[in-house]
Amino acid sequence: MAKQLFSNAYLMVNSVNLSDHIRSVTLNASTEIVDATTMSAAVVKEKIVSWDDWSIDVEFAQDFKTAAAGAVDVTLWAVRTGHAAVAIILKPNGDTTAATNPKWTGNAIMTSYSFGGGVGDLATATAKFEGSGAVTRAVAD
């Protein structure tokens, strides 16, 4: 069975490539299940699919040293204060989309942003993006 190291994730947030600052990234996809059991079901519950949901959690190496476009704080603070869904693209291994490197795209609202660290530690930032609409998976651009 093939195994893969996760070492070259690609993340585009609101048309800004933040890939070179990613320390970790997680795509969370879930489906809500509703209990539809009725009195006639005897002893077995009946469940039906309701809504799909998705989110992305990211930890970045923080970047306050530049105010240029593409810096972590500049990009994320603008998304945070915009209070709107922005385009997200996530790929596990670099920016080329392929069967062995699929991409997930969708629009998401940043629901949390924090940064910090201790004396002498790497300054980090974390962000959570909650999906607004569907997330799609593709193996070609």
Image: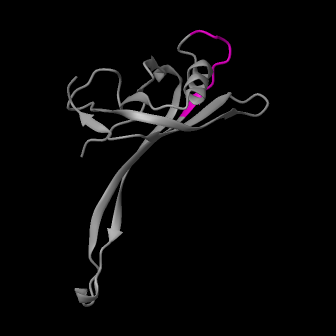
Q: Identify which residue, 2 or 10, lies in the foreground.
A: 10
- Residue lying at 60% horizontally and 27% vertically, measured from the top left: 81
- Residue lying at 26% horizontally and 37% vertically, measured from the top left: 137
In the image, taking residue 55 as reference, residue 47 lies left or right, namely left
- Residue lying at 26% horizontally and 76% vertically, measured from the top left: 46
Location of residue 64 with respect to 30 vertically, above or below: above
In the image, taking residue 135 as reference, residue 26 lies left or right, namely right
Farthest-out residue, bottom = 42
Farthest-out residue, right = 119
Q: Identify which residue, 93 or 62, lies in the foreground.
A: 62
Q: Identify which residue, 27 or 24, lies in the foreground.
A: 27
Please report the bounds of the magenta region as a residue range: 59-68
Residue 2, picture quadrant = top left
In the image, taking residue 21 as reference, residue 87 lies left or right, namely left
Q: Is residue 106 magenta?
A: no
Percent from the top left, x then y, of residue 89? 37, 28
The answer to whether residue 38 shows anywhere in this view is yes
Percent from the top left, x then y, of residue 141? 22, 22
The answer to whether residue 28 shows anywhere in this view is no
Q: Main secondary structure of the magenta part?
A: loop
In the image, taking residue 133 as reference, residue 80 lies left or right, namely right
Location of residue 95 with respect to 117 vertically, above or below: above
